[in-house]
Image (cartoon, rainbow, N blue to C red):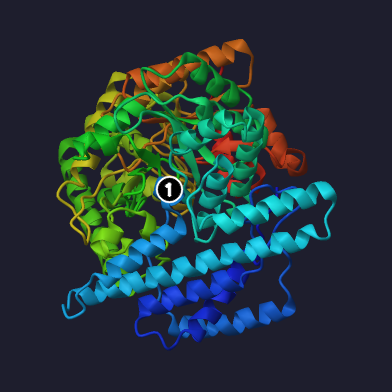
Amino acid sequence: MSELPSHGWGLRRGLLQCEGWIASGDQPTTRLRRAASLAYRMEHEPVVINDHELIVGCPDLSNVTEDEQRRSEEMGQRARACIPPSRGVYDHMALDYEKLIRVGVDGLIAEVDQRRRSLDAQLPENTARDEFYCGCLTELIALARTARRYSEHARAMAADASAERAGELLEIADILTKVPARPARTFREALQSIHFYTFMLRGDYQMGRPDQVLIGLYRADIAGGRLTPDNAMELIDCFCLLYSSCHPKGSAVGFMIGGRDGEGNAVCNELTYLFLQSIAHTRMAYPGIGLCVHGETPDDILESAVEMLARGYSHPAIFNDDAITQGLLELGVPECDAHNYVHSSCVEITLCGQSGCWVFNPTINTMELFLGVMKDHGECEGVGEFLEIYERELRGRIVSEMRTQKMWQLERSRNGGDSLLPSCLVNDCLPSGKGIDEGGANYNFIMPTFLGTANLVDSIIATKILVFDRQELTMAEFYQILMDDFENSRALHQRIVNSFPHFGNNEPETDTLMREISAMLARSCEGIVNLFGARAVPGMYSYLKHVTEGEKTPATPDGRRAYTALAAASSPAQGQEVNGPTAAILSSTCWNQLPFMGGVATNLKFHPGGAETRKSMKAVIKTLLARGGLQLQINCVSEETLRDARRNPDRHRDLLVRIGGYSDYFTSLPPKMQDEIVERTAHLS
């Protein structure tokens, strides 16, 4: 796998965009200047076509020259002085790729041009629409030109290539004269069109549902003798390998397979199997593949998924299709849309081709807030009063954080922020003449996420026992013990860790409290909206934040030591689910997850094994689905392997692990993130 250097492709793209900004000073608005600078970058970016590639569009990973480094430093200073900052969430969505392969970029250009020409320029409200359409045209035309430049380069390379490679290059050149400009007529053209459009963007754009979008072209090619399943498998593998070349470490990008179509029919076709098989072929961190499972999912698909997980590939993540669809319906999403969702990076649920959602924002550290309440409200007479104060403080924190998010959205609505290319493939942007940054998408939810929920449950239990029930400590005394990181209270620490109830063990007290706390978190988001009036939809997953936020958080009442990781996502605290995988999954699904379309990630770690391990995994998955859990991600790796990977990273560079909603290479993770993975409880089969 090619590794993206921090100073390579990103520096070069940034340099070109800065140069484009300087060159586009004659543009009348900031948004049009952003579009022109992006077009400049696309048209000046080096063309890279690597050996053996069948689908092209790869970063220039060559070393940065001294001249580029110097120019970047100079341009960086100028850019910071003159380019307005753009804050908030980009990407994290699936575009309407079905439309792309149906009409092509030329079709999008024609639509935009027609809509612009139909505007009444005398109406003041059409000025912003005119600006939007002009920016879209600038970027779409540049993208089409860039594809032709790739085609010309491939044709030139063929002159010096071996006979076999020359044939491949000429075929690549021919394909790029057609797509993404024109509609895709074949399975391969569709894959190339989708990748090339996405490659021109910045960030993590999900492919959506490829086994639905591409099945028609696949079957037509098979019937016409233009393709075999083996050829298709090779193309899919090539397509999937590009994810790891085009996305830096720490990305969360991929697609979903299975589930149901817009009419509610179960989807399990030839491509479902082929995309699932690609996991074993590529064995990469990306794409992150989600398998949408429901009551009609064939058992052999689930068996194949379990086999992949048992081999330690970390994919696919399992998503409960029936529960997610129901959760979207309860948000008011029509059923035809509710089936067409995607995990928009890690586990956040958004609608394919229709979303301008801000996911994973804001993030709320539940334990930082808990410690603040302990410090400022030690006079509480009981745990009920304490939780009332906590909920009030939580609501205030969310309102305050949302105000900042709305300010960022306001600035983006005025001056833009990212490429307009995504808006060309997100409904209802083109008909409305409004980009994603202006709220033009059909769905504009904002999705705050809550960190350390299991720590919160366990901390409430510990505080209730020690302060309110047994009155062994005052709140102030307990708070000071935490600020001292249990240094002079080692016996108390061991007692909390080893003797107190902890969430994740199918215990009535902690499970009941988890139901109450999760309901409180959902309730705290009610009535809160973003700039576009779209509601706040909570999530309970962590990405890497449970580690980075933990590094800033003192010790907590559940026995967690200072500045160590918080509990990952919605999972039990590390090392605390001691009653086996069934108990862990029963606790993890004891609460109503349907309001949490902002994403729920549940982690389990299994010891590697044979048939018994696979049997246990499958049973756990089915239990989660039956009990309404939204998502499950599984690591199947021994603690011994993880520890050896820390000692000898060069021997384990391909070791994949699930984090807090996505997969990554264990040896590339920061040391504290590695610690958190090692400390998770591993269940025996």
Q: Amino acid at mark 1?
A: Arg
Is residue 129 among the parts visible in the rendering? yes
Residue projecting furthest to the front = 224
Q: At 41% across and 33% down in the image, what residue appears?
A: 571
Residue closest to the eye, 546 or 38: 38
Using the image, determine if residue 640 lies above or below residue 613: below
Residue closest to the eye, 625 or 673: 625
Please state the horizontal and vertical placement of residue 508, each as a whole percent of the image. 28, 19
Residue that numbered label 1 is attached to:
102
Mark 1: few/some/many CA within 10 Å (<14, 14-19, 20+): some
Q: At 35% across and 33% down in the image, what residue appears?
A: 458
Residue projecting furthest to the bottom = 26
Q: At 60% across and 50% down in the image, what residue appears?
A: 670
Please state the horizontal and vertical placement of residue 673, each as a whole percent of the image. 56, 45
Please state the horizontal and vertical placement of residue 490, each as a whole percent of the image. 48, 37
Q: At 59% across and 48% down in the image, what residue appears?
A: 243
